[in-house]
Image (cartoon, rainbow, N blue to C red):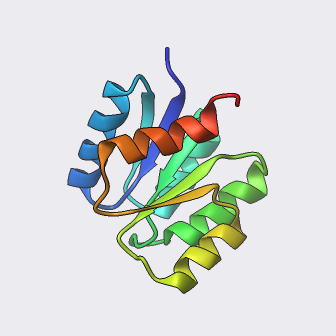
Amino acid sequence: MGTRVMIADDAAFMRMLLKGILEKGGYEVVAEAKDGVEAIEKFKELKPQVVTMDITMPDMDGIHAVKEIMAMDPDAKIIMVSAMGQQAMVVDAMKAGVKDFIVKPFQAEHILATLKKHTEPN
């Protein structure tokens, strides 16, 4: 089985789109979360190897969720996927511990290349 991934995004369509891209690329999507709170719970329970995280979500945003997950597991591999191309958000996300940043709309190849960069030994 491929690398275990969790997708956190409040938009069901975006989760479905990412899941399709990842599964075609050989990844195993073990969980989907619709907000930061659910992302933290599922991360604790399932320990995915990689997390894709949206920034703007209800209840708890992605940056807050990243901080919580990184506090639990400093080695967590989290990749931000967001339409928010704002510089401040990107900087906050990187400071919180994300490994990479993908801006929506994205190309499937870019998603797969970014995950591969962070999951496969060099």
Residue 90, placed above or below residue 53: below
Q: Residue furthest front?
A: 122
Residue 60, placed above or below residue 48: below
Rendered image quadrant of residue 105? bottom left
Horizontally, residue 99 falls left or right of residue 87, namely: right
Horizontally, residue 41 falls left or right of residue 52, namely: right
Q: Report the label total.
A: 0
In the image shown, does 121 or 19 lie closer to the viewer? 121
Q: Would you say residue 42 is visible in this rendering?
A: no
Q: Residue furthest left?
A: 13
The percent coordinates of residue 92 (x first, y second) are 63, 77
Horizontally, residue 14 falls left or right of residue 55, namely: left
Residue 68, placed above or below residue 83: above
Task: Kindly identify the residue that appears in the image at 53 percent across and 83 percent down.
Answer: 87
Task: Kindly identify the residue that appears in the image at 46 percent across and 83 percent down.
Answer: 86
Say which quadrant the C terminus sits in: top right
The percent coordinates of residue 89 (x first, y second) are 53, 79
Horizontally, residue 104 falls left or right of residue 112, namely: left
In the image shown, does 85 or 3 lie closer to the viewer? 85
The percent coordinates of residue 20 (x first, y second) are 27, 35
The percent coordinates of residue 23 (x first, y second) are 34, 28
Task: Kindly identify the residue that appears in the image at 39 percent across and 72 percent down.
Answer: 58
Q: Residue furthest top?
A: 1
Q: Would you say residue 63 is visible in this rendering?
A: yes
In the image shown, does 87 or 34 lie closer to the viewer? 87
